[in-house]
Amino acid sequence: MCDKELLLGYLYDDLSAVERKVFDAHVATCADCRDELAGLRSTRSSLTAWAPPEPDLGFEIVRGGAKSSASRGAWWRLSPAWGLAAAALLTLAVAAAVANLEVRMGAEGLVVRTGWDRGTSGPVDQATTFQTVSASDVQKLEARLKDLEGQVSARPAAVATVSTLPVNRMSDAEIVRLVRQSVSESEQRQQGLLASRILQVSRDTEAARRSDVDRMLTFVRQVQGAGYETSQRQRALEDHLVRVGLQR
Amino acid sequence: MSDEELVARSRGGDLDSFNQLVLRWERPIYALAYRVIGREEDARDVAQETFLRAFRALSGFKGQAKFSSWLYRITLNLCRDWIRRERRTPIAQAPEGIDLVELAGEAVETESVDELVSRKELSRAVAKAMATLPDEQRTAIILKEYHGLTFQEIADLLDCPLSTVKTRLYQGLTVLRRTLQQAESEPKRARSSGTLRPVINSTNLESTN
């Protein structure tokens, strides 16, 4: 019985000089060990073909935040809806800041105004209105104002809706009542519209049904007519055969 | 600079030295995790977690073993935890078929496409054959063949006698030899994809030091 542990050490070149010499002598006379050594060497050679994929690693420990990349990435995993909402809020905030937006409810109703023209339209706080500005600043402001006016005029329907609301010195309760009334009216309109659409669909369905029934009746009549004609021909043929038979 | 020197500097608070160790060992650690658990992304996570744990436990590493052996131990522990958590075998499949376009992109000047196809098929056959081995034999072969550990280092890492390591290696290699010979006799394109099974389920790898 050959020493397999020695054979393994020989295979991995992990023998002392004496052990190697002894095993060399053994292999020279043992065909089984020679075959086994050759087979295992071939197997070891085959094992080198199994290589792992080449990933993008680049790990690095960072002071003050030894988080995994997965946890770092998780913070940013917002749903698209949240992302859009956040973007919309950010845009609104930036736009309001740029336009110096003012929303006020006063004697003239609900007022939506960009702040660049406050100095000429209505009483405002003296401290925030009068400032020393240069001619270039004024030109910039005028250009900005034209730009903003252009933007506002691009939304006439929305502005009109807002500016015509009857909210002259209304209390909160009145506003709520008006809103409820508006919602109620809207619901009634929607219900009316829905009813009319249901009626229209019902009519269309009935018309289609009648048309289909008519076509089916016509087809049945045609089939019945064809059957009648066939039966008549058969009867005539039978009569003819009977007559011929009687004559014979 | 040696691992030991970098470890000493890291223990002194030098983060760059530790990151040099990371750079030096990230691929071998990833390769070990990949061959053990067989999933690319999970192997990457295991490798990453290995270095995080090593960094946190660096003060407890007294240099009684090689730094690499210490990393291997942490990795194998994490692989064992992963296998317990996942509770599934087989865990990975080698890809079906061979994409010649992809292979052509990988071809090097000294290797024809035919040779590359043969190497890919051999790689798949090896993965499949390794999957047939008992976990402890497979672990021993991975550590010996792909990481060049000595018999004694493997015995220390797996907390088993030297003779046991040699027995596992010999038995595993013998099975691989037979399996690969059978695979060679099959028609080349008829070979099915290999599957990898987790390697560790009985080895004692509790401590990280």
Image: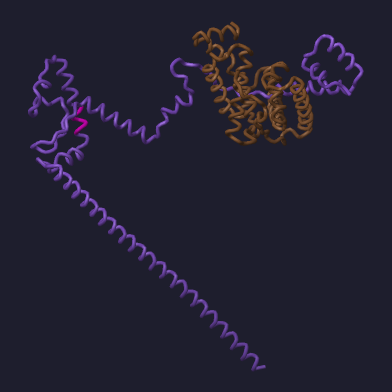
The quarter of the image holding the N terminus of chain A is top right
Q: In this view, does B47 lie above or below B186?
A: above
Q: Does the magenta stretch include residue A241?
A: no
Residue ID at (36%, 63%)? A205
In the shown orientation, is residue A150 left or right of residue B189?
Answer: left
Decide which of A94, B136 is in the foreground and name it.
B136
As drawn, the residue found furthest toward the right would be A29
Which chain is purple in the picture? Answer: A
Protein image colouring: by chain
Residue A213: quadrant of the picture: bottom left
The quarter of the image holding the C terminus of chain A is bottom right
Q: In this view, does A221 lie above or below A90?
A: below
Residue A139 on image: x %, y %: 16, 19
Decide which of A222, A131 is in the foreground and name it.
A131
Q: Which tint is chain B?
A: brown
Decide which of A135, A125 is in the foreground and name it.
A125
Q: Is residue B5 above or below residue B171?
A: above
What's drawn in magenta, residue-wise? A147-152
Residue A238: quadrant of the picture: bottom right
Residue A81 on image: x %, y %: 37, 36
Q: Is residue B105 visible?
A: no
Residue A33 on image: x %, y %: 86, 21
